[in-house]
Image (cartoon, rainbow, N blue to C red):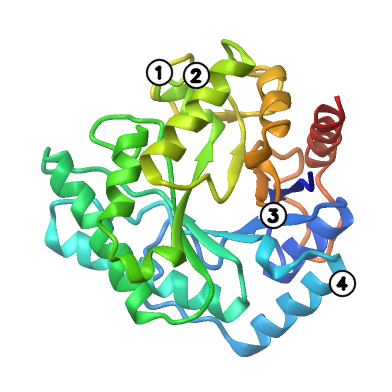
Amino acid sequence: MTRYLGAHTIDSGGIHMAARRAGAGGMTALQLFTAIPKFYGDKSSIRPERVERFRTALEAAGIEPARVLVHAAYVLNTATGDEEKWSRAAAGLRKELERSTALGAGAVCFHPGAATGGDRAAGIARVGRAITQALDAVPGRTRLLLENTAGAGMTIGRTPEEVGAILQAVPAPLRGRTGYGLDTCHLFAAGHDLTASAAALTRILDEFEAATGEPPSFFHLNDSEGALGSNKDRHVLIGDGNIGRAPFGWLLHDPRSAGIPLILETPQENPAIADDDASPDPWDVRMMGLLRELARG
């Protein structure tokens, strides 16, 4: 079974440097931002020369574009009941898909957001509408993938049923360009106990697959600072949190982890790296080694 391991690498110096750092770290997958994640990015386009630099660096790194995952801005709340904020979030998601399609990325992942009006069913419908509008507006092969959430407050997407309901709100002709992925920290924080046993982890994945009709299209491999069911979205290095190493080994031996991006979003030792320094982060290198060891075990 082929495992495509990577990380959300630092993009100091540009997104082409993120690709170079991933290549230098021996990664076969990559995650990055195409715009500043604290802003909507609804008016941010991507220049052709930036696209060319990225594609050249990606090819040199030996990473297939299909294994590139773009993370949308954190502020995009497509579940909100505030129509003005929803419109900006939907526009930001559409623009992200446009930028990512220009790059040739395999997919965009995004957090669905929170049903600020208190109606979870209405929030789910609004997320589905935002996905549909983005896919209708931007042709191409780049997919738009939901990410499960840690479940704080009125956040949508913490259960298999909610993820499945969002996807069911997308018209059937567009479903091939959408899907979902699972973050291990978010699963644990939302109350899904990956640590109980290998069989328990399998059951969790089975529940998401049954509710959605498909396996995940990516995994985020993060340990959790918070306790089980804490709803706390705090990532730590694998083995330093409350999930521990063993469940990552179980996950890497599940056939659903084959052939898709497996992305670390764990802390980096040198987040202030110089723009022209293409060296991989030491903590990313250590985590990659650990994951390879767990995959072999």
Labels 3 and 1: the sequence-earlier one: 3
Left or right: residue 103 compared with residue 97: right
Q: Residue at x 84, y 50 (%)?
A: 280
Point out which mark residue 251 bears: none
Element on which disc 1 rests: loop
Element on which disc 3 rests: loop
Marks 3/1: CA distance?
Answer: 28 Å
Quadrant of the rendering where the N terminus is positioned: top right
Q: Residue at x 34, y 30 (%)?
A: 151
Asked if the residue at tag 2 contacts the one at tag 3, i.e. Cβ–Cβ closer than 8 Å, the answer is: no
Labels 4 and 2: the sequence-earlier one: 4
What residue is disc 2 on?
A: 226
Give how far across and how far down residue 248 sits, in percent. 69, 27
Quadrant of the rendering where the C terminus is positioned: top right
For residue 292, above or below residue 174? above
**Structural crowding at the residue carrying mark 2, measured as other residues with C-alpha within 10 Å and reported as few (<14), some (14–19) or many (≥20):** many
What residue is disc 4 on?
A: 60
Labels 4 and 3: the sequence-earlier one: 3
Left or right: residue 185 compared with residue 238: left
Marks 4/2: CA distance?
Answer: 38 Å
What residue is disc 1 on?
A: 230
Marks 4/3: CA distance?
Answer: 17 Å
Element on which disc 2 rests: loop
What residue is disc 3 on?
A: 10
Q: Amino acid at mark 2?
A: Gly
Asked if the residue at tag 1 contacts the one at tag 2, i.e. Cβ–Cβ closer than 8 Å, the answer is: yes
Q: Nearer the viewer, mark 4 or mark 2?
A: 4
